Every structure is written in structure tokens, then in C-alpha cells.
Amino acid sequence: MPHADDPVETIPVTRALRRSRGRWRIFAFLVLAVAVSVGLARFSPLLNPVGDVVARVAIAGTITTDPERTALLERLAEDETVSAVIVAINSPGGTTAGGEELYVSLRALAEQKPVVATIGELGASAAYMTAIATDRIYARNLSIVGSIGVYYQHVDASGLFETLGVDLDKVASGPLKGKPEFDEPISPEVRESLTDLVDSSYAYFVDLVAERRGLTRQQTLSLADGRILSGVMAIEAGLVDQAGGESDAMAWLAAERGVDPDLDIVSVWPRQRAPGWLDLVFGSLAGMFGENGWPGLPLDGLVALWHPHAR
């Protein structure tokens, strides 16, 4: 009977251990390679070694606040390889805070380098607030533009609760705390406080449009009743500079800002996903939930949105 330390018995075990270690090394290398690919895809062209580029920032769908987007715009301002930025807009708007955040970030970016907006099918409400932060606005003749305004939406389900025999009760620190509630109509006192909120945000929006588009306040107010305009109408009203798209924006950058017209245009937002199987897996998941999270998730709070279902 062979001894426990017999080489004949231990060699197969040693070989098996070596094979196991080898597999784990290969797995670790693949994980590292994927991590590097994700990093390069995510931060390109901020780490682009091939030369100067024009960065494209796409603003699509519902606009909300986004710290990652803000950080990227800050990096674009500092990146010397980015000669200019084109903001490609196709959005019905979103939250007032989201529109303000984009406006402020783009104004800071425009202090460092040329920034131009192009509006595709739709550039309304908070998306138009985004556009006016840039140096020049292009839109198609039949783009939908405008919807300058703010609203607060409330669902009154008191009739349904009454039918179901459900009554909600609470203790609050003040008469306006937690108002409005969906189990009761908006009272005059609550409506007055919400009107003040909407009016304050609306005045902020109107002042931005007047300042950035060189309009008087009265001219702006005549356009700021929530109406939407075609691109042709928006140009006539002074809300858009010229009909056109990305090629026209590049031509203007070359003629007016000295940007090389032959520079590549590189998309930097939304963030790039890693290629291959990882993109297929996570891309499919993103498609299931939509660009801004769960599909159909209502916006909570004050919104500057043309149509709540145009997401």
C-alpha cells in the first residue's frame, strides 16, 4: 500500500492545484481588463491622446439634477484638448432645479470655451433654459421650441378615497406642512402658497430668457405664457438664432470662434458604456428601466416641462 507522502499520490493533487490557480489568475486578469475598458470608455475623450476635439453633450429625455453630469461639464471646461462643446438637445424639459443646474454649469463652461446648442425635435421648457445658456442656438424649422413657464401638478383622489371608505389623518407642525395632499382638494390657503412658489420660479425663468436673448421683459412675457413655437416662429421671435443643425454649428464655430472645422466631434454625454458583452448586458438593463430610471416614474416637485408624457 503506497505511503501518504508517496510522490505518485501527491503529483496529481499538485497539478490540480496549479490548474486551479491558473484559472483564478486568468479570471482576475479578465476582471482587470474589463475595469480598464470601463474606465477608458467612461472618461474618453477627456483622456484622449489623439489631439483636439469638439465635445458633444446630448441632453435627451426628462431633465433632472445630475452630479455626474455637472462634474463632467466642469472637466470639459478644464480639458485643453476640448476646443468647443455642442449641446445636442431633444427634451421636453424636466424639473426646474434640473434646468437651473444645467444652465449654471453651461454658463460656467461657456466662460472657458465656445458652446453652441442644437435643438432636434424638441427643446421646450427646462430644455430651452438649457439652450439659452449657450453662445448660439440652432433649431430645425419644424422643431418644437419654447413652453417658457412653470407648473405644479396635483392629483386629487379624494373622490376615490371616499368611495373606498378610506380616511387619512395626520398631525402636522403647521397648516401648510405636507400640503397639498392627494386625499383632498387644494384649499385656497394652500393654492395661494403654491402660486407664490410657481410665480417665483417663473420670474426667474423669464429674467434668464430676457437677459440671454436680449429681449425686454415685456417682449419675453408675451412669449412666456407656456406656448410652444415652431423653429421658424422661434427665430422670428428671437428665441433661436438660426435654422440648422450640427454642421451649421460647426461652421459658426469655425467662422466666429476660430475652431478648426476638421476636428472630430466626440460624444461625451451620456457616459459611454464598455463595449462587447458588458454593454449588451447593462445596455439591456438600462433599456428596461429607461434613461432616467423606472419607466413612467412621475416627477416630484416643481417642473418646467412642456408635456409630462413626452419622455
Image: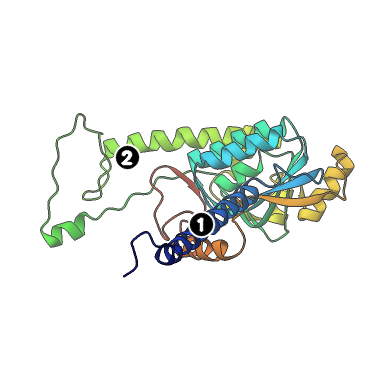
Between 305 and 290, the residue placed more toward the observer is 290
Q: Is residue 19 left or right of residue 164?
A: right
Q: Residues within 10 Å of mark 1 (few under 14, many from 20)?
A: some
Q: Position of residue 293 (x, y in %)?
A: 44, 55
Which residue was labeled with disc 2? 191
Colour scheme in use: rainbow
| Extreme-bottom residue of the structure | 1
Q: Is residue 2 above or below residue 304?
A: below
Q: Is residue 6 above or below residue 187?
A: below
Between 71 and 205, the residue placed more toward the observer is 71
Secondary structure of residue under mark 2: helix
Q: Is residue 217 above or below residue 120?
A: above
Q: Earlier in the sequence, mark 1 or mark 2?
A: 2
Secondary structure of residue under mark 1: loop
Residue 215 seen in render = no
Between 245 and 275, the residue placed more toward the observer is 275
| Extreme-front residue of the structure | 1
Residue 168 seen in render = yes
| Extreme-left residue of the structure | 165
Give the residue displayed 31% in from the left and 70% down from the top.
1
Q: CA distance from mark 1 to mark 2?
A: 33 Å
Give the residue displayed 39% in from the left and 56% down from the top.
297
Q: Is residue 285 left or right of residue 185?
A: right
Q: Amino acid at mark 1?
A: Glu
Q: Position of residue 72 (x, y in %)?
A: 61, 40
Instruction: Give the mark toward the camera: 1 or 2.
Output: 1
Query: How many labels were placed on the picture?
Result: 2
- Mark 2 and mark 1 in contact (Cβ < 8 Å)? no
Give the residue displayed 78% in from the left and 39% down from the top.
81
Which residue was labeled with disc 1? 291
Q: Amino acid at mark 2?
A: Arg
